[in-house]
Image (cartoon, helix red, strand yellow):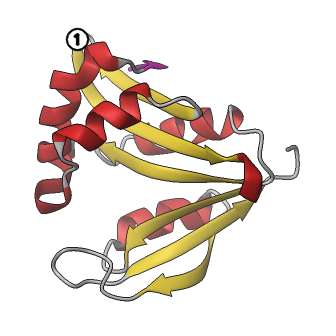
Amino acid sequence: MDIFPASLRDLIKLRHFERLCFLADAWPLLDLIAVLTYPDVIRLKAVDGEEMIGFVAADLHASERRTWIATLGVAPEYRRQGIATSLLHECESRIKTPCIRLSVRCSNIAAKELYKKAGYFEVDTWRKYYNDGEDAAVMEKVLHNA
């Protein structure tokens, strides 16, 4: 597995990847184009050969002195191999704000545990955030090197 910056050239693979990983929560095409082209977005892909097996994107909000991890996913057959942790750490190493936030489904215990092990803690709950009405846990990490 290797980690590289993602670009608009990855659009078709990312669209397939989103549907594979997030089912009903997959981003629409315009959001995928945006995440691959907007400035101030860190976008990294994990690949196995030519296959995209993981993706992370972080959106810098300099005026808030905060970066939001907008998405982090790993293809189902590659989970529990440390890929999400590697993507998260690589992404964090490129963040220059003192605070990182993200949201995750309250029912996604595995993801919440991954984030807790990486130093995130729950700071808020967004009620009925997801299309199906499930709440999102907002998690935060303070970077000491930023």
Residue at left 38%, top 26%?
Answer: 46
Residue 14 horizontal side relative to residue 137, left or right: left
**Label 1 belongs to which residue?**
50
Count of numbered badges drawn on the protein: 1
Horizontal and vertical percent for residue 49? 26, 10
When asked about the image quadrant of residue 16, the answer is top left
Q: Which region of the structure is painted magenta?
A: 1-5
The residue under label 1 is which amino acid type? Glu
> For the residue labelled by badge 1, is the local secondary structure a helix, a strand or a loop?
loop
Quadrant placement of the N terminus = top left
Q: Nearer the viewer, residue 59 or 83?
A: 59
Is residue 18 visible from the viewing direction of this image?
yes
Residue at image point 26% right, 74% down: 130
Q: Is residue 146 above or below residue 46?
A: below
Is 133 inside the magenta-drawn segment? Answer: no
- Quick check: 7 above or below 65? above
In the displayed structure, does residue 46 sit left or right of residue 51? right
Quarter of the image that includes the C terminus: top right
Report whether 117 appears left or right of 87: right
Q: Residue furthest right?
A: 145
Q: Main secondary structure of the magenta part?
A: strand
Measured from the top left, where is residue 62 in percent x and y? 73, 47
